Image (tube, grey):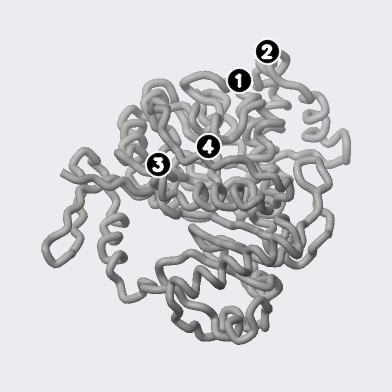
Amino acid sequence: MNFVSSHWGTYNFSVDRNKKIQLDNWGLDSSPTEFGIGLADAAIDNLRITQPHVRKGWLDNIGKSDGKRGRDEFIPVTWDKAFELASKELLKTKNVYGNSAIYAGSYGWASAGRFHHAKSQVNRFFNLFGGFSSSFQSYSYAAAQTLLPHIIGLDLYTTLEEHTTWNALSEECELILMFGGMPLKNSKVSAGGVGKHVTKLGMKKCCDKGVEFINISPLIDDAPKFLKAQQVPIRPNTDTALMLALAHILIKNQSYDKDFIDKYTVGFDSFSDYVQGKKNNQECNPEWASKITNIPVKIIYELANKIITKKTMISLSWSLQRASRGEQPLWMGITLAAMLGQIGTASGGFGFGYSSVNSTGDSFDKIPWQSLPQGKNKIKDFIPVARVTDMLENPGGEFDYDGKKLTYPDIKLIYWAGGNPFHHHQDLNRLTKAWQKPNTIIVNEIWW
């Protein structure tokens, strides 16, 4: 029996005499997703690219951009011709401008395999070629990647791996307060592959054991119906105001865990002064928060009473920090969890990304696995991945990142393999315009 693992799940696969691919659930996943089945059709779809193609405008004026990217026709060429064109442009860029002028991009849900992992192949190739300007972090949770080491002393991936499991929550927790909800649709995937989909089962187990769920979200379907969650509609991007109001109630009533705060945190006195309006003459009370969030004052007090009297998990969705000042709800959610004094227990604390992917809250062991050696990048220039438009618009310009002043490289050639920046990036009109600037763009792609 043959198996294939993808970001969407693990499947049995077979190929008949007519080369038709058949995928089926492998049997051990009690909550499989239908997405992966479509891989069989995609493999033979008419949109498959069957040979190299070169944009006509670039081919007519090799090595120069004519501003027609995205609205020009492509000319099929032989593999030998494609290799010749690509190798000449890579060598020319390296020799004339230096390796920092090459931006090697790979981002998104490309192959989950170890050898066919696109980013590993790109990194290996360009490290052997002398280096390249690279990208760090993720569109999914970049604010958390930057902030968590400063707030809790752990990097994001360690934090995700050490999340309280669904099994522990079902046995110990009494209330899960979901900022941003827990939309089940997002848990159908996990980067690197899924064996068993456990999120739905974990939620149901918590529900069956009497754990209460409250959905703080403008969308009612951010919580599955079977959770029977209390719905608290909130104005988008105002979660921090609600959290501050809850903290205000805890401080006023002296209901926070003072021993935990004194032993495990720093800076609480300054935070408390801010919440009470001692710094700017504005108390962050429920009346203030209600005007911002559109949540009735009565509901805010009821929420505060529940988190004070119950073993509470403060759940923060990844979506909260994908917004202006997105670091605030993340930081404030952890602060609120610290005030409840349950961080580090099986019953509560904070979570970041329950149901954002299947793996968060799963119980698993880390197994060492072979990977393709990538070597080292001799070029130190990099950008946070979501700054690609800014980089192309401002070569040589300064930008702030994690307390440092850095400089954008002057990119003359982009080589992209795995994923697609136009699937992730914000403000596509700006990106489309900036995308015209490099002399040459080379893409490894299998579909039009």
- Quadrant housing residue 56: bottom right
Numbered disc in front, either 4 or 3: 3
Q: Secondary structure at mark 4?
A: strand
Tell me which label, 1 or 3, sits earlier in the chain: 1
In this figure, which residue is indicated by the disc labeled 4? 315
Tell me which label, 1 or 4, sits earlier in the chain: 4
Q: Position of residue 433 (x, y in %)?
A: 68, 75
In this figure, which residue is indicated by the disc labeled 3? 358
Between marks 2 and 3, how big is the CA–CA gap?
35 Å
Q: Position of residue 55 (x, y in %)?
A: 54, 81
Residue occupying the point 26% across, 61% down: 40
* Residue 232 in view: no
Do the numbered discs 1 and 2 sit on residues whose CB atoms are within 8 Å?
yes
Between marks 1 and 4, how big is the CA–CA gap?
15 Å
Q: What residue type is disc 2 on?
A: Asp
Between marks 1 and 2, how big is the CA–CA gap?
8 Å
> Dot 4, crowdedness within 10 Å: few (<14), some or many (≥20)?
many
In the picture, measured across the screen, residue 124 lies left or right of residue 401, that is: left
Q: Is residue 445 above or below residue 326?
A: below
Residue occupying the point 68% across, 73% down: 439
Checking the image for residue 341, the label placed there is: 1
> Dot 1, crowdedness within 10 Å: few (<14), some or many (≥20)?
many
In the picture, measured across the screen, residue 364 lies left or right of residue 414, that is: left
Q: What residue type is disc 1 on?
A: Gly
Q: Nearer the viewer, residue 31 or 19?
A: 19
In this figure, which residue is indicated by the disc labeled 2? 259
Residue occupying the point 15% across, 43% down: 1
Tell me which label, 2 or 3, sits earlier in the chain: 2
Q: Nearer the viewer, residue 52 or 197?
A: 52
Q: Secondary structure at mark 1?
A: loop
Q: What residue type is disc 3 on?
A: Asn
